[in-house]
Image: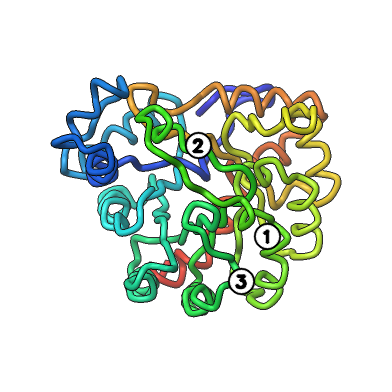
């Protein structure tokens, strides 16, 4: 278990990207190179084999190295949910399975239907700015209805969005931030009170708005992941961000995450160290720390797991 100012903690990571071979294959087609493997020299990263179980094994080894108990692994391209489903199927006790879904695609509802029945998938990830739609778009409604009925978590990326791998490859990122406001989620979260919504990166630059949202909607959780570079927009530091979040929503709805993604970097332990330091300096006690770094995520996903696993 990772060492912290409170001693050993059970750590569950709410935000790890599962960059599969299929994911890199999609980038290779956009980059107009012959194969996913051709990206290795450009990126300086390891390209996984076509077998998602090999990547899953790499992540379990990495998690063992740092003492991470579980991670939410995210299939990071529409149509790639099979990769994380395979990982969860092989390592049920180590992974939760999330997958990116683009609601404007013609197969979106069908994929959501299949996911609702798949015991290896736990959450749908929506990126409105990336896929240029509003979270209030009628095309999203049937997906949310399925999530509500099945207990799937709904992760909604808000605020600034920057995809590092696309930048490194020189690929355009034609995202639209008019669809990034967390307040757009307000009416949706109220209408679907049974869904547990997760907004990553403290709203990624829209802290005030995401705190308003979470204050008004008790089914909204905040994921603490990434370097949170957006803090520069408002002259904030991590300790201040945690302090404001705790004052508004408490600690029970904060979910630790790193936004880890590629190898050879692997699990970004520096994010854990930075967040643990900030919380300790704020005076978090051991119980609060255990909640943020591990217990809260288990509780959020318990209802979905109990429903589909019958445990």
Secondary-structure class at tag 2: loop
Counting residues from the start of the chain, the first of labels 1 and 3 encountered is: 3
| Whether residue 56 is visible | no
**Rounded to the nearest whole Å, what is the CA distance between mark 1 and mark 2?**
19 Å
Label drawn at residue 136? 3
Q: Position of residue 249 (x, y in %)?
A: 79, 52
**Rounded to the nearest whole Å, what is the CA distance between mark 3 and mark 2?**
26 Å
Q: Position of residue 45 (x, y in %)?
A: 30, 24
- For residue 224, side relative to residue 39 (left or right): right
Which residue was labeled with disc 1?
220
Q: Position of residue 285 (x, y in %)?
A: 77, 34
> Residue drawn 35% across and 66% down?
119
Secondary-structure class at tag 1: strand
Counting residues from the start of the chain, the first of labels 1 and 2 encountered is: 1
Label drawn at residue 259? 2
Task: Kindly indicate the quadrant of the structure image that contains residue 24.
Answer: top left
- Badge 3 local density, few (<14 within 10 Å), some, or many (20+)? some
- For residue 195, side relative to residue 60 (left or right): right
- For residue 303, side relative to residue 91 (left or right): right
> Residue drawn 77% across and 36% down?
241
| Whether residue 243 is visible | yes
Closer to the camera in the image, 3 or 212 = 212
> Residue drawn 60% across and 29% down?
227
Q: Where does the C terminus fall, quadrant-wise?
A: bottom left
> Residue drawn 67% across and 33% down?
230
């Amino acid at each position: 278990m990772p060492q912290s100012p409170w001693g050993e903690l059970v750590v569950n990571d709410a935000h790890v990207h599962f960059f599969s071979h299929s994911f890199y294959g999609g980038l290779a087609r956009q980059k107009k190179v012959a194969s996913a493997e051709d990206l290795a020299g450009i990126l300086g990263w390891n390209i996984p084999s076509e077998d998602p179980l090999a990547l899953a094994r790499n992540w379990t080894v990495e998690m063992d190295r740092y003492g991470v108990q579980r991670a939410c692994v995210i299939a990071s391209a529409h149509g790639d949910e099979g990769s994380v489903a395979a990982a969860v199927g092989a390592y049920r006790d180590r992974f939760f399975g999330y997958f990116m879904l683009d609601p404007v695609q013609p197969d979106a509802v069908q994929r959501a239907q299949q996911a609702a029945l798949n015991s290896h998938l736990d959450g749908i990830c929506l990126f409105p700015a990336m896929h240029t739609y509003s979270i209030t778009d009628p095309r999203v409604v049937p997906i949310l209805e399925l999530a509500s009925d099945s207990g799937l978590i709904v992760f909604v990326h808000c605020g600034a969005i920057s995809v590092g791998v696309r930048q490194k490859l020189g690929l355009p990122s034609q995202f639209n931030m008019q669809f990034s406001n967390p307040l757009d989620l307000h009416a949706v979260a109220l209408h679907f009170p049974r869904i547990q919504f997760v907004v990553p990166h403290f709203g990624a630059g829209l802290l005030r708005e995401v705190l308003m949202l979470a204050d008004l909607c008790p089914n909204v959780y905040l994921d603490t992941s990434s370097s949170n570079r957006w803090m520069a927009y408002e002259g904030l530091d991590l300790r201040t961000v945690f302090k404001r979040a705790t004052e508004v929503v408490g600690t029970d709805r904060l979910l630790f995450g790193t936004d880890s993604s590629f190898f050879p970097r692997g699990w970004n332990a520096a994010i854990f160290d930075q967040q643990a330091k900030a919380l300790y300096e704020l005076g978090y006690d051991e119980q609060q720390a255990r909640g943020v770094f591990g217990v809260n995520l288990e509780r959020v996903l318990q209802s979905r797991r109990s429903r589909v696993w019958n445990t």
